[in-house]
Amino acid sequence: MPPGESIMAKRGGGKRHVSLEQEAEENRQLKELSHDVTPDKLFERRWVLTLLGRVMESLRANYVRRGKEDIFLALKGALEWQSTEFKYAEAGEKIGMNENAVKQAVFRMRKKFGDLLRWEVAQTVTDPAEVDAELRELLHALGD
C-alpha cells in the first residue's frame, strides 16, 4: 500500500455504492425503454401489475382471515401467468392434500382471484358495464 493510502481507500472507501436491487431495477427500466415501449404503454403495464399485486394481497388476506395462509402459500404459484413450474402433487405434499384436492383448491383460488380482480376493476370505472372491456384492455397491456 503506498504511503498515505488508508485501508478504507484501498477497499473502496469514499466511493458511491450501488445495491444489487437498485442495479437490477435500473437494468429492468433500461430494458423496458429499449424495446420501443412508449411511456403510455409502460404506464399501463405498471398499472396492471400494481392492480394485480393489490388483488393478490387481497386474496392472501382472505386466506389469512380463514386461517389458511399455508394453503395460499403452497398454491399461489398456480396463479402465475402461463406457469409451467407449478406441480400439484408437490404442493399437496406441503399442505397434506392429495393431487385432486389441490386441483379443486386451485380452481377455487383462481375463481376467487377472478372475482377480486373484477371487483378491483369495477372500482376504476364509472359504469359496471365497462368492466369486461377494461379487463380486456388490462390483458392487452400485459401482452404488449
Image: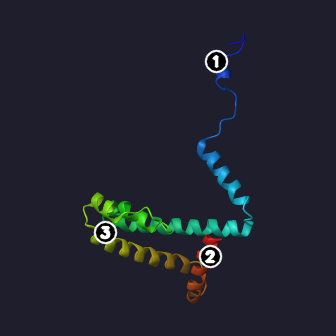
Q: Earlier in the sequence, mark 2 or mark 1?
A: 1
Residue type, numbered disc 2: His
On the rendered image, what quadrant is the C terminus found in? bottom right
Please indicate whether residue 43 sits to the left or right of residue 135 in the image: right
Tell me the residue at 71%/54% (across/down): 30
Asked if residue 86 is positioned above or below residue 10 in the image, the reply reads below
Which quadrant of the structure image shows residue 73? bottom left
Looking at the image, the residue that sits furthest to the top is: 3
In percent of width and height, residue 59 lies at 42, 68
Q: Residue 140 shows which numbered tag?
A: 2
Mark number, residue 87: none
Disc 2 to disc 1, C-alpha distance? 55 Å
Graded by Cα atoms within 10 Å as few (under 14), some (14 to 19) or many (20 or more), the crowding at tag 1 reads few
List the residue tagged with mark 3. Answer: 102
Nearer to us in this view, 127 or 96: 96
Residue indicated by mark 1: 7
